[in-house]
Image (spheres, grey):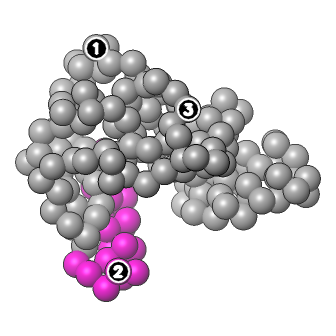
Amino acid sequence: MRLYHGSTIDIQHIDLAKSRPNKDFGRAFYLSDDHQQALELAQFRAEFEEAVPVVNIYDFDEKLFSKFRYKRFEGYTEEWAHFVYDHRTEPHGLTLHDYDIVYGPIANDRIGAQITRFKQGYITFDEFLRRIQYIKGITFQYAFCTQQAVDNLIKL
């Protein structure tokens, strides 16, 4: 399967230590199977950084999913929302699971504001779940969380 990573650099070597903490599924290398989605992310970053957008393309053998600890969220569920909330609010930026790869929906860009509202008691968890759904409709991401998983991505 083809996977895409939107960036402003051509990534020759994936270094998980450079991954940002407190993302939806923890510290990981995030990819999409949707080229357009990766391109839009690259363009957004490029505009913000005053750089050139780059879409890195990788191949991953889908047969390998069975060899990894793999978590799959099929949609916006309570389990997914708790998983995202826990990773977004973990005070030390730790990854709170032992999965090699996590697949699931992308949270809304304004999730920080919704986390604050929920923590302060202004909204219920059900409302939090509703508000963190991606505005443009459901889109999915792959998080490669371990070096073992990353080592199976083939740069094209």
Q: Percent from the top left, x then y, of residue 61?
A: 18, 27
* Left or right of 138, for residue 1: left
* First in residue order: circle 1 vs circle 3: 1
Q: Amino acid at mark 3?
A: Leu
* Left or right of 34, for residue 25: right
Residue at image mark 2: 49
**Dot label at residue 67:** 1
Q: CA distance from mark 2 to mark 1?
A: 38 Å
The structure residue drawn at horizontal position 57% and vertical position 63%, both measured from the top left corner, is: 109
Give the SS element for disc 3.
Answer: loop
The structure residue drawn at horizontal position 20% and vertical position 67%, both measured from the top left corner, is: 9
Residue at image mark 3: 96
Q: CA distance from mark 1 to mark 3?
A: 21 Å
Give the SS element for disc 2.
Answer: helix
Q: Percent from the top left, x then y, of residue 78?
A: 71, 33
| Quadrant of the rendered image containing residue 108 | bottom right
Q: Amino acid at mark 2?
A: Glu
The rendered magenta stretch, by its main secondary structure, is classed as: helix
